[in-house]
Image (spheres, helix red, strand yellow):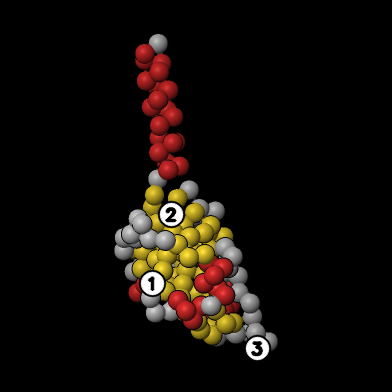
Amino acid sequence: MKNVALLLLLLIAPAALAKDKVVKRGAAIASDAKAVAVAEVLKNPDDYTKNPVVVEGTISSVCTMKGCWMQLEPGVRVTFKDYGFFVPTDSQGWKARAEGVTEVKTLSKEEADHLEGEGAKLARNADGTAREVSFVASGVELRK
């Protein structure tokens, strides 16, 4: 009976650990840092361009080529500082915590086409360009 219990523990434990596993990339995020809602950042993005903040959300899409960006609900694309790290390409649906600053810019038609080809969702202007509010993260933590 003891061997059966040990065997069950060995079979169940890896799955439990995998679900609770935290994938960390980039700089460490302070564990006590209070998060700002992504929706709040989107309302006033210029307020968050200078001082880093922490945002949390669910990954709605991710770069399918190499994980060089992720999109958090309700619709902010997160890139990674200095192209210094990537996230797993299968992390769609995972919970994310990211620290960084916002960036507001106009994407050319070609840049917008490229990003949409990788799965990004953008609001296009009449000329094919897109105004984008993105979040440049210095570090991220992901959980399944």
Q: Which of the 4 image quadrants contains residue 20?
A: top left
Q: Residue furthest top?
A: 1
Residue 11: % across, % down? 42, 28
- Mark number for residue 127? 3
Instruction: Say if residue 83 shows up in the picture.
Output: no
Element type at marker 2? strand
In this rendering, the label closer to the viewer, 2 or 3: 2
Residue 86 versus residue 136 in the image, above or below: above
Category of crowding for the residue at label 3, using alpha-carbon neighbours closer than 10 angstroms: few (below 14), some (14–19), many (at least 20): few
Where is mark 1, residue-wise?
52
In this rendering, the label closer to the viewer, 2 or 1: 1
Where is mark 2, residue-wise?
142
Kind of residue at disc 1: Pro
Q: Residue furthest left?
A: 27
Residue 84: % across, % down? 34, 69
CA gap, disc 1 and disc 3 = 33 Å
Q: Are the residues flagged by discs 1 and 3 in contact, CB closer than 8 Å? A: no
Kind of residue at disc 2: Leu
In primary-sequence order, the first of circles 1 and 3 is 1
Residue toward you, 71 or 64: 71
Element type at marker 1? loop
Q: Residue furthest bottom?
A: 127
Picture residue at 37% right of the left edge, 20% below the top:
6
Picture residue at 60% right of the left edge, 70% below the top:
121
Picture residue at 57% right of the left edge, 60% below the top:
60
- Mark number for residue 103? none
